[in-house]
Image: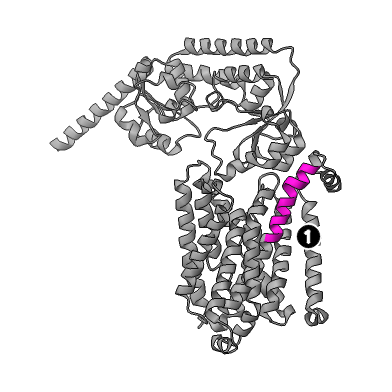
Amino acid sequence: MNALRNSPAALNALLILATMVCFVLSLGTGSADVSVGKGIADAYRGVTSMESLIVTELRLPRALLALLIGGTLGMAGAALQGMLRNPLAEPGIIGVSNGAALGAVVMFYFGFASIGWYLLPLGGLLGACLAVLCLVLLVPHNSNVLTLILAGIAINAIGSALIALALNFAPSPYAMQEIVYWLLGSVTNRSLHDVAIALPFMAIGWLMMLRCGSFLEALTLGEDTAQSLGFNVRRLRWILVGGVAASIGAAVSVSGNIGFVGLVVPHVLRPLVGYSPRRLLAVSFWGGAILLLLADIVVQLLSHGGEMKLGVVTALVGGPFFLYLILRTRSYWS
Amino acid sequence: MFSLRLFLVFLFALGMAHTANASDITAQKPQRIASLGLCTDQILLMLVDASRIATVNHQATDPVASYMAKAVGNIPLNYGSAEEIIPLHPDLVISTSFGSPDAVRVLKKLGYRVELMPLPTSIEGIREMLLQVGQWFGETEKAKALIAEMDQKIIAAQQRNQHKPPLRAIIYSPNGYTIGNGTVENDILQHAGYRNLAAEMGVQHFQQISLETLVTTTPDRILIDNYAYNPNSLAYSYINHPVVRHMIPNENRMYVPSQLRDCAGPQVADEIAWLADRR
């Protein structure tokens, strides 16, 4: 542990290795009993076989999305916790994910998403922006945990009510049942097309968040200090918010709202990076990827045919952790 | 005292009226039959003259979903609520055990005669159901004639297509539902000369199967339910997924007309013919 703490490169390398292991495990997990090796070999030679179809068209997009979305959630959680200087900030808890889901629902069910590929993630981005804006306006910086959580509850409630409203008016008769997917999230039955439409927006979001690493570092000393150190606080804060909205908007628009990843991962990893918010961004990406890949493997092992939602697993892990955090931070509350 | 006596007389009279009414109903065929759902609508329209039908569900007029859409004519329509049924004073209300359970409970409580049509799980079950329903309507002979006609159509379809080899098929509906053993659909596939891969996999009744499992069944034909087709829903992401496109070429995807497939009734003979002729 101490060796890891002193060597950021070693910690990153270890996490990347673990992510790769989970990725390979994920490719090997599924309801069909097929040889993954044969599937990859066939796909490589351009042969269309049952194995190659299952590996390239079903398992690869699923594993890729779990990796990318888990990473996004982890990094966005670390960014929000750093920016709001609040240990309970998380895209799901503060309502950003529900805002993104609302934007994606409107684009998807009313046919806008078939006009251009970019409209679905863009809808998610706009919804996420709206939620973050509400939060930034409602919650003054450095406010206590309670204000943030209460604002989050309100934004979440409005978000899920509007999702239900939009689905009620959607032309598809199946829309209303699909609220489960938008509120709990899943990467089942996704295709490489979904990876392709989400990736550009997610990547832009990652770069924007990483760009603000040293700003987050300075922010731990307070806004005034950060300003006096030469950081343009106002501008950098917008870049951070934009990065969170872009990456979460794109992630949620292809997977629904998967909660708690952004809460648990930065907390577990923070001591390992010496409480540095800058270094936490990258390691939280890999930590989130690992958590979501494992959660998706659990979903596939537990559900036979009929699918369980990813958010169920992440909430069962994250919920108790959230309670634990509340107990531990109880001293701030009064 | 006097007023109490009058009240008792009134009650007695009410009771008499009620019993008289009840014996009327059993003595003759029901004259104002109300149906609450698509499946009962279709059987009712097949067996009973329009003049004896008080109301059918609005779905009965849907030309895509309803086998009897043309027969509805001027019959008043309902949306399955008790409030619409009561002003029509029906002497028989029919529904299924699935449709409008709240309306059924209220109507029963108010003393209406409500009969629930059984949902058949085989073609033999359809025959039994028709005889039962025919008895309620006082149309047993007509029900028997319908059964004979259905059986003839099935035999004719089978004889026409005797020489063709059996095909391996699987039903795949929105949300990835497939249909296996213990269902009319399974019986229909077998009568039409198809092997139902879901039944062979051990699926009982209805079950969601993953796209991976679907790919491993390597069917010759896939039967897709595209009633209410709308690409803008996750339910159809199962059917529109690239893996289904790659695995099963367009010509091997079959879309059974909804009006033949929605309800179990004599129309299954037409579905069997439709499937058998496309083998």
- Which residue lies most toward the left here? B2
SS label for mark 1: helix
Q: Does residue B167 appear left or right of residue A150 in this picture?
A: right
Query: At 80% across and 82% down in the image, what residue appears?
Result: A6
- Where does the magenta region start and end? A52-68
Image vertical order of residue A313 relative to residue A264, above or below: above
Q: Which residue has dot 1 on it?
A: A22
Residue B168 higher or lower than A165, as above or below: above
Residue at image coords 73%, 36%: B247
Q: Is residue A62 magenta?
A: yes
Q: How is the structure coloured here?
A: one colour
- Where on the picture, by quarter, is residue B93? top left
Q: Predominant secondary structure in magenta? A: helix
Of residue A93 and residue A202, the one placed in the foreground of this image is A202
Residue A120 belongs to the span the image colors magenta: no
Is residue A57 toward the left or the right of residue A308 in the image? right
Q: Which residue occupies 62% across, 43% down?
A: B237
Q: Quadrant of the N terminus of chain A?
A: bottom right
- Dot 1 falls on which chain? A
| Residue type of the residue flagged with mark 1 | Cys
Q: Residues within 10 Å of mark 1 (few under 14, many from 20)?
A: many
Residue B133 in sight from this viewpoint:
yes
Residue at horizontal 62%, vertical 85%? Answer: A218
Is there any visible trace of residue A318 in the rendered image? no
Q: Position of residue A328 (x, y in %)?
A: 62, 79
Picture coordinates of residue A11, whole percent (x, y): 79, 74
